[in-house]
Image (spheres, coloured by chain):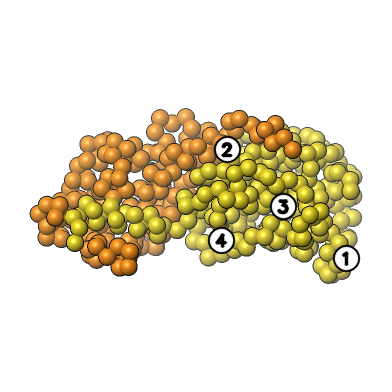
Chain colours: A orange, B yellow
Amino acid sequence: MDWSSLVAPKSTETVFAEFVENHGAGLRHAFVARYGPDVGADVMGDVTEYAWRHWRKVSQMENPSGWLYRVGQSRSRRYLRRPVRLPAPRSESEPNIEPELPRILLALPNAQRVALLLTHGFGYTVREAAGIIGVSASTVQQNAHRGLTQIRAEMGVSNDA
Amino acid sequence: MPDLLTQLSDYARQLDDETPPLHAFATPVARSPRRATTRPWVVLVGAAVAVLLLIGVPLLITSTWFAAPPVQEPPVTTVAPSTTATTVPDAGFEYPTDSLCDWFTAEDMNQIIAAAQERVGTGWPLVAFEAEDCARLAPPVGARWDWNHTEPKPGSQNAVPGLAVSLMPVAWLGEEPVADFVGHEMLDESVTYGNLHYHCGFLDLMSVELRVEGHEDDVLSFSMFLYHPYASCEGVLTYQFGLAVADSMLRDMGWVDGARQH
């Protein structure tokens, strides 16, 4: 069978797949940072489905990722009964993580936790993180800095030590 | 203890690892509402199929004559065609306005999914249920989510949500659709129409438009996609599963007479 004759060069599905491939990882990290792995994954699922359903509109957006992050925030309401949870550090594979780190992260304001984990955790630049969640770079930088300062205070360290 | 930034990085990696596989999504199965008339012979064939099902299902279940054993591979469908009354639409079924929700119940979809999984050798824990707005969803057992499907915009050929199947993210799918129509009695090139998309990557997609002889203006569009952040392309399960589902649906819809003759 000549598959090339059956596969359209740029179908809507392909374009959407490329979009998810390009933007999905950042959104997924943002939702995990905001809601934890369990709820974050569900929210990401809802958002991807929503993006597919509204692809005509989403594809025209200047920053679809930022808009979808807000869609996720809206959709997260259905999971209100499920607490935001961050897992304890794995003692076997991550023995050098302060056990209190998840609790301290959860105590941060949501925006600070998301900004902090996106930039210092998942390794996005400030500009990239700003694009993912649809805010200004200065907002991300400020929130990340405040979050980092708060964590240092909680952990009793004055610098990166 | 490492510095705080290293801890954050390590902990983020752990979060990444522990994030459950992200969900698969809508599988709109849509018909293009083009035809305004209901063909009488369709009703007659449907009624005949209904009678056959009611009388012969116990025998069919044990005989599996309908299983259409593949030419090369051994998988045999042992799930009977749907036995619910809605499998065969009544005389009031209107192609232009009715959707596949008028044809398949959640129970029907469970049987179709089971049959498809048996064919392709998957064991995804899917259970279909009826959503509010004409959709059949099949999330993983125990899934804590559902969707709010919205009605499509008029004129969108492939957006009519007649039926939806959600697939649990599984070990990933194929690089190329090496599978063909072997084992799918209802399918061959003559009933594929328009396009057959398959995309393998971060998001796995498959979309098939089927056009059965005698129903050239009634396109059955079927698509699904899986989303799995950890996946890599290792098989063609989505493609095979999609073919099997489409095959079963066409079979249940009584389009045998209009499809390729065997």
Q: Chain of mark 3?
A: B
Q: Position of residue A32 (x, y in %)?
A: 37, 53
Residue B244's disc is: 3
CB under 8 Å between discs 2 and 4:
no
Q: Secondary structure at mark 3?
A: helix
Q: Amino acid at mark 3?
A: Ala
Residues under labels 3 and 1: Cα distance?
Answer: 23 Å
Q: Residue at x 69, y 36 (%)?
A: A3
Above/below status of A110 relative to A81: above
Judging by the rendered image, the residue that carries numbered circle 4 is: B140
Q: Chain of mark 1?
A: B
Q: Secondary structure at mark 2?
A: helix
Residue B100 appears in the figure: no
Disc 3/disc 4 C-alpha distance (Å): 19 Å
The residue indicated by pointer 2 is: A13
Q: Quadrant of residue B131?
A: bottom right
Tell whether B31 sits left or right of B254.
left
Q: Which mark is residue B56?
A: 1
In terms of depth relative to the viewer, which is nearer, B129 or A136?
A: A136
Nearer to the camera, A89 or B103: A89
- Residue type of the residue flagged with mark 1: Gly
Residue at 22% across, 51% down: B5
Tag 4 subunit? B
Q: Could you give the CA–CA distance between mark 2 and mark 4, rounded to whole angstroms?
A: 23 Å
Q: Earlier in the sequence, mark 3 or mark 4?
A: 4
Relative placement, left or right, of B246 versus B169 is right
Name the residue located 86 percent from the left edge and 62 percent from the top edge. B65
Give the mark toward the camera: 3 or 4: 3
Provide residue A85's location: percent of width, then percent of height: 34, 62
Q: Residues within 10 Å of mark 2 (few under 14, many from 20)?
A: many
Q: Secondary structure at mark 1?
A: helix
Amino acid of disc 2: Glu
